[in-house]
Amino acid sequence: MLMKNRLPAGWAAKWIDPELPHDAESVQPASVLRRRFSVRETADAVLYITCHGLYEASLNGQRVGSFVLAPGTGDYRRRLTVQAYDVSALLREGENELTVTLGDGWYRGNVGIDGLRNYYGTDLALLCQLEIGGEAVLCSDARWEASQAGPVRENSLQQGERYDARLEETGAWHGVTVRDFGYANLAPTESVPILEQERFPGRIFTTPNGETVIDFGQNLAGYTQLRVRAKAGQTITLRHGETLDENGNFTQKNFDPGDRNKNGGIPQKIEYICKDGENVYKPRFAVFGFRYAKVDTEIDLRDAAFTAIAVYSEMPQTGFFECGNADVNRLFLNSLWSMRSNFCDIPTDCPTRERAGWTGDAGVFAPTAVFLADCYPVLRKWLGECRLAQREDGLVENIAPVNNRGGMISNMLQGSSGWGDACILVPWALYNACGNKEILEENYDMMCRWLGFVEQRAQKTRLHNRKNPYHRYLVDEGFHFGEWCQPDVDNTEVMKTAMMKGAPEVATAYYYRSASLLSRIAGILGRPEDAARYAAIADGAKKAYRFACTDNGVIRSERQCEYVRPIAFGLLDGEEAQAAADALNGLVVKNGYHLNTGFLSTPDLCRVLAENGHTDTAYRLLLQDDCPGWLYEVKKGATTIWETWDGVRPDGTVHDSLNHYSYGAISGWLFDGVCGIVLREGRLSIRPRPDRSLDFAKAEWRSPLGVIRSSWAYEGEKLCLDISIPVPARIELPNGETHQADKGEHHYEIHL
């Protein structure tokens, strides 16, 4: 059992390196370490353990804990977590044996957007201390033995594993080397473990080009367990991919890593060499993004079994949604599965190509994530990585933990608005969902320093914007991704334009949004002077935005995002917001009820329309099954959310990741819009916005306040609503009626 917030009172253990001298650039087998020891007592036994790399520990042949890919990821130079396990039940009086296998993992395996090796170091190392009743009875030290002759011959999180089952009786033991890595970066585990979760049996079929492929029916992050009968020396190779190509054949083209192809790409490969008889295997130190696996083997597979095991952080599902449209129900599940696939210790963008903790992704999805699953510990840990990655000048890196070595160009392309602002947006989403001020306090310094960085940027307004009387609050300098991934827009050109001419619409809007939120946060935390200062900044940014980006509050643009953002952020006053929403509605209708928003504003599109009298258009967007539209990918058989709207084009060609959660933020609107569950700053309201196109809808949120349920259904000329609330709440019915309702069950009927 994993125990949180535990470290030994003092370290008697030493860091030990199990490897013999070798070429640091060559891929090494996993290392196996062992130590025999004796104890008289077995009660109150705690094993403290961490490593450089990944570890799997066994005590007397029984696995210690269920944490896979331990000790997890992070900026190891600054913070390396130590796990504490209660191992009393695994100990026995007398002689015991502790064995630990170490793999490369995030520490020295291929990681990040560039697939770098040896990012944190070239070594593997173990630190562990077993205590009984608070007294150390076993420590990692020079008395341990190690071997590189075990079955895991190669391992990499992204590349895969090569396993030789004939070597499971490990030999060639030798001594270890004590290293002085110190203890200053060690910290107790505060988050939740990464676990094996759902399992999906595979279906074997033959593709048109004659390949043997397994379909597991669900795109996920995890690995494959195989069970085959074979002769010693026979091999089976699995390559994992997300989809089939336009001809129905296996492909990995959609996460083509570009320059990494010269180093073998991202094969997501298992190579298994069999022993005689039954072979059962799953990787220990690799995790893939996949639905399909291509099989190469001479083994008879008629009695073989293949199972995909989903691997993600422990975070029970808390949000449940169902409606009268099967495609929307699938869309909801796709959002959930993309979240599961990308919440592996920290939130990442995709489980194949990059696996990076992009701030922008977390920022747009956090308000939805808190509905779907108990993700507070995962996002809290990731915010800690954001704090570690923040630069001295306050810039928040686009990725946390940083996983590239950088350079002049890389350093220039940092601190994008909408990305860095996640340091405020994510804690705010967690606070609204959980009501815990600690998450605001914990990140307050980071928020203030980020806003200070943006404030300094705003002082460097480009000459052509100096005519703006509020130009000191206009942000048009620095690097910005802008409204990333808009349909029919060249994103590279957007970035070039932002670099050359500025991006004041997006950047200044986020300056206002973050300053106004930070003012509220300062008030919540009892800092009135800060609250006043940030409110003044917000006021200035709003005026700067209105002067630069509107015509006296009137927006003139053909891009939907430039209406959604100011409405959602509150940059328009009074009737201006309604006029902008009406204009936005006209653009959507003109575009055949297709969206053309991108990464930042898509989460608010339906919400803005529905809250301003255009519920019918919001639903038509939700139900759009032509590209670009949410149900297009569902009609194409997607089981997760795609990175781009046309990840599988109408002709069947594939590109980009098919497992990005960002556009799954629409599921947040299913809860707070369609079913109307809104929890903000501790105040619950229920204000559903039904539409006949779904026939019925029901949502359940197992919130920190208790279970909240909201459902509606059309029954002839009558709309029936059923609401269950754990605390008093304001209920706003679609016909304009309002009720101050006590906790409990409430039923309403509206005659249409």
Image (cartoon, rainbow, N blue to C red):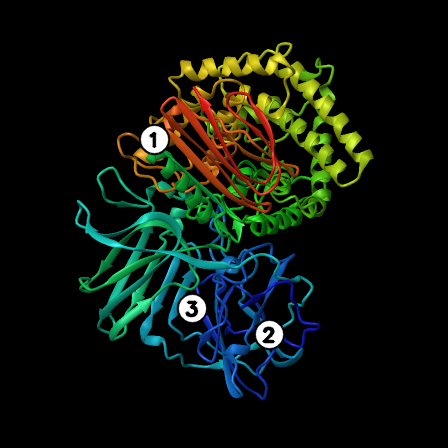
Q: Which residue is mark 1?
A: 632
Q: Which callout, 3 or 1, points at the residue further toward the start of the chain?
A: 3
Given residues 414 and 660, the one toward you in this image is 660
Judging from the image, what secondary structure is the residue with disc 2 in? Answer: strand
Q: Which residue is mark 3?
A: 29
Query: Residue pushed farthest right?
Result: 529
Q: Which residue is mark 2?
A: 46
Residue sitting at 50 percent across and 78 percent down? 90
Judging from the image, what secondary structure is the residue with disc 3 in? Answer: loop
Find the distance from the CA under tag 2 to the CA under tag 1.
Answer: 52 Å
- Residue 72, image x and y in percent? 53, 58
Residue sitting at 30 percent across and 63 percent down? 226
Q: Are marks 3 and 1 in contact (CB under 8 Å)?
A: no
Q: Are marks 2 and 3 in contact (CB under 8 Å)?
A: no
Query: Horizontally, is 549 left or right of 369 in the view?
Result: right
Judging from the image, what secondary structure is the residue with disc 1 in? Answer: helix
Q: Quadrant of the C terminus?
A: top left
- Structural crowding at the residue carrying mark 3, measured as other residues with C-alpha within 10 Å and reported as few (<14), some (14–19) or many (≥20): many
- Residue 617, image x and y in percent? 43, 20
- Residue flagged by tag 2: what amino acid is it? Val
Answer with the quarter of the image where residue 741 lies: top right
Query: Horizontally, is 699 left or right of 79 in the view?
Result: left
